[in-house]
Image (spheres, rainbow, N blue to C red):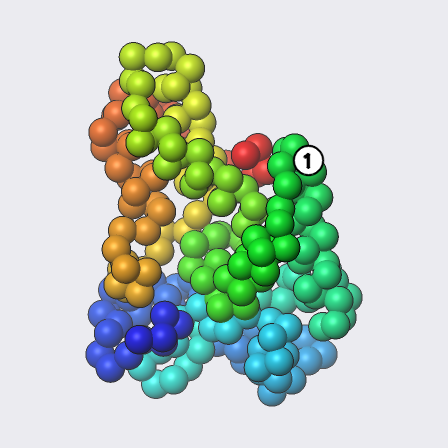
């Protein structure tokens, strides 16, 4: 099954409620814009914009409301890829890490598939970088738990809250298309359930940030 389509009868009523509450069809994305929906569809087909994050049973593609954010920031369709890579590379430099061309290509493919629309509240290269960094760090921390160590506990709590601020809730169907529990299940819900005392005083995340 193509992970961006529902398949016959795959979406439940709960999926449809979630998707229609948080995502919009291309006509809505184009409302008030100079580009017509057909022009945006052509950009999607040419690999300048992401494919729909979800597709309803009637064939309607559903997109994040910020679908055109990267295009607007880049200034033109031809500049989108270089703009995307440049922002990722600046984030890597900011945190003292290196990104290979292979990694950049993989992130771009994921962006164009629409997958980041499923997991990120706001899809930007900066949030993509932070999400991957937090996922890596939390996966390592939970694989070698040290709840008796204050530093480990503090870092776990900070990283869980940071990832929570970045990530959407996900549709139930995402657990099917991505082949099992999603990062929110594994790296936010699971540690909160396992170590409830660490999160008892944690407040509601104020919104995405770049402290990753």
As drawn, is 187 to the left or to the right of 118? left
Residue at (24%, 74%) from the top-left corner?
10
Residue 112 figure quarter: bottom right
As drawn, is 24 to the left or to the right of 126? left
From the viewer's side, name the closer residue of 70 and 134.
Answer: 134
Judge the density around disc 1: few (<14), some (14-19), many (≥20) Cα neighbours within 10 Å: few
Residue 141 figure quarter: top left
Residue at (26%, 72%) from the top-left corner?
11
Mark 1 secondary-structure assignment:
helix
Residue at (43%, 41%) from the top-left corner?
135
As drawn, is 115 to the left or to the right of 82? left
Instruction: Please state the horizontal and vertical placement of residue 21, each as a whole percent of the image.
Output: 39, 64
The vertical placement of 7 against 96, above or below, is: below
User: Quadrant location of the C terminus?
Assistant: top right
Residue at (54%, 42%) from the top-left corner?
130
From the viewer's side, name the closer residue of 9 and 151.
Answer: 151
User: Quadrant location of the N terminus?
Assistant: bottom left
Res. 24 in view: no
Residue 188 figure quarter: top left
Instruction: Please state the horizontal and vertical placement of residue 82, each as a whole percent of the image.
Output: 72, 61
Res. 149 in view: yes
Counting every numbered tag in the picture gives: 1
Instruction: Please state the horizontal and vertical placement of residue 193, each as a whole percent of the image.
Output: 23, 32
Instruction: Please state the horizontal and vertical placement of residue 32, each as a whole percent of the image.
Output: 66, 75
From the viewer's side, name the closer residue of 81 and 210.
Answer: 81
What residue does disc 1 label?
A: 94
The vertical placement of 84 against 88, above or below, is: below
């Amino acid at each position: 099954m193509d992970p961006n389509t529902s398949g016959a009868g795959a979406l439940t009523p709960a999926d449809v409620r979630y998707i229609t509450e948080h995502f919009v069809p291309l006509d809505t994305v184009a409302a008030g814009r100079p580009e017509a929906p057909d022009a945006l569809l052509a950009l999607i087909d040419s690999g300048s914009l992401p494919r729909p994050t979800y597709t309803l049973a009637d064939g309607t593609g559903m997109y994040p409301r910020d679908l055109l954010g990267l295009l607007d920031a880049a200034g033109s369709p031809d500049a989108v890829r270089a703009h995307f890579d440049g922002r990722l590379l600046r984030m890597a430099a900011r945190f003292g890490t290196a990104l290979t061309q292979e990694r950049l290509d993989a992130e771009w493919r994921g962006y164009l598939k629409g997958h980041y629309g499923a997991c990120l509240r706001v899809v930007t290269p900066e949030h993509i970088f932070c999400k991957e960094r937090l996922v890596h760090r939390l996966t390592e921390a939970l694989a070698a738990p040290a709840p008796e160590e204050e530093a480990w506990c503090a870092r776990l709590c900070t990283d869980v809250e940071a990832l929570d601020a970045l990530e959407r809730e996900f549709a139930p169907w995402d657990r099917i298309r991505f082949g099992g529990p999603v990062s929110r299940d594994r790296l936010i819900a699971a540690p909160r359930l396992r170590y409830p005392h660490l999160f008892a005083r944690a407040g509601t995340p104020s919104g995405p940030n770049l402290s990753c």
